[in-house]
Amino acid sequence: LTRQGLEEYVSDCVIVLDHRVSGQVSSRRLRVVKYRGSTHGTNEYPFLIDENGISVLPVTSLVLQHPASTQRVPTGVPRLDTMLGGAGYLRGSTVLVSGTAGSGKSSLAAHFADAACRRGQRALYFAFEESPNQIMRNMRSIGIDLQPWVQKGLLRFQANRPTSAGLEMHLTMIHKTIKTFKPQVAIVDALTSFIIGGNEIEVKAMVMRLVDLLKMSHTTSLFTSLTLSGAALEQTQTAIASMFDTWLLVRDIEIGGERNRGIYILKSRGMSHSNQIREFLLTDHGVELRDVYVGPSGVLTGSARLVQEAQEQAALMTRNQEVERRQIELERKRTTLEAQVLALRAEFAVQEIASMKIIGQEQAEDAQLAQERTDMGLSRKADTTPYKQRGASK
């Protein structure tokens, strides 16, 4: 370790500083070889020299002792909150959004940051593919303006190329920024930018330490991950999905010669969640999740959905017209029958009046005939009492 080969035996504390270059990227590391009379870490630690001095991050000593909250954090997309049990992500949890290029990962990340700033919380956005100005310009096209939050100090961008430093150095810079800014929400866009020249194992170790770091600070974090076209969608390049509490998958759905966007939740620990594949649109007012539409051949999206909706609307209109025709026909029959009943009642009333007149005339004639018979008997001095009544009186 030393030029003479004796100093490390004589000294009580030996610290080795190393400056190495890997893949044309340099990084500084520190290791405590020995420290008599004291327990100490023996791993290598990256350290950073900047305007604030030396920053050392003992990333290899993080342990699984982070807190677990039951509070919820909105995603910024109300219908996505509904899919996640009605209230969004768990506070302090880690979220992975994976999908192919152009599927809407960064749009969901921008919604999450915008929603946090609207609540008055601080959001930290780590960008490794685009500059902050480019991100803000692109998000304005879907109705999300991040510039006011930057001016108010609620949103901070930290944009660096993955090749600007080694993985451990990036982790050290992230740790330093989190410590100074103290965000409630953090976004890492995108993890797959660090995969260079078959370093998947190193990237996985770096992500593991970063996840532990964010959970220890109780920061709700969202990571994006690019899935290569043609690769299995439910698989990440670095096999890191098991580290995350919630995994959202955005994908392209090809139906009828067009590509539409869909989203579903592969897992979300600690909460009930939807198992549906939902189509979503990037509109001028942000991400809009559409209702699940199931046709005869399964879930439909895009033009196929519009065509099926038009066919069903036409069929519904035809059925409504048939129902209306039957109702009109029934009403016509009811009107006809009621008119016939009224006519019969009128005819019966006329016949009743005529019959009552005839009955009255006949009764009058009978009474007059009886009176005339009585008068005739009296004129002849005849006994006017009927014979039957006389016999009964004896």
Image (tube, grey):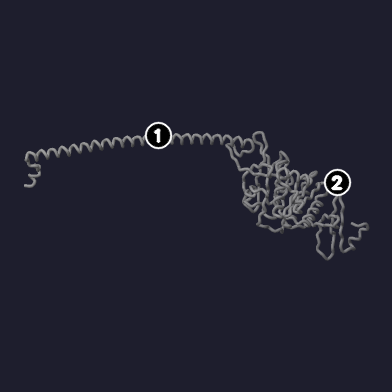
Image depth: mark 2 or mark 1 in front: 1
Amino acid type, mark 1: Thr
Can residue 260 be seen in this snapshot? Answer: yes
How far, Cα to Cα, is label 2 from label 1? Answer: 96 Å
Q: Is residue 24 left or right of residue 127?
A: right
Q: Which element type, helix, strand or loop, lies under badge 2?
A: loop
**Image disc number at residue 336:** 1
Question: Residue 25 location in percent, x, y?
Answer: 85, 48
Image position, residue 118 (x, y; %): 70, 52
Left or right: where 334 falls relative to 3: left
The local crowd at label 1, few if under 14, some if 14 to 19, many if 20 or more residues have their Cα within 10 Å, is few
Q: Position of residue 197 (x, y in %)?
A: 80, 43
Q: Contact (CB < 8 A) between labels 2 and 1?
A: no
- Comparing 235 with 163, the one in front is 163
The answer to whether residue 185 is left or right of residue 168 is left
Badge 2 or badge 1: first in the primary sequence: 2
Indicate which disc residue 24 carries.
Answer: 2
**Which residue is drawn at the image coordinates 27% and 35% (left, top)?**
354
- Examine the image and state in which quarter residue 102 appears: top right
For residue 335, above or below residue 242: above
Name which residue type carries label 2.
Gln
**Rendered image: mark on residue 110:** none
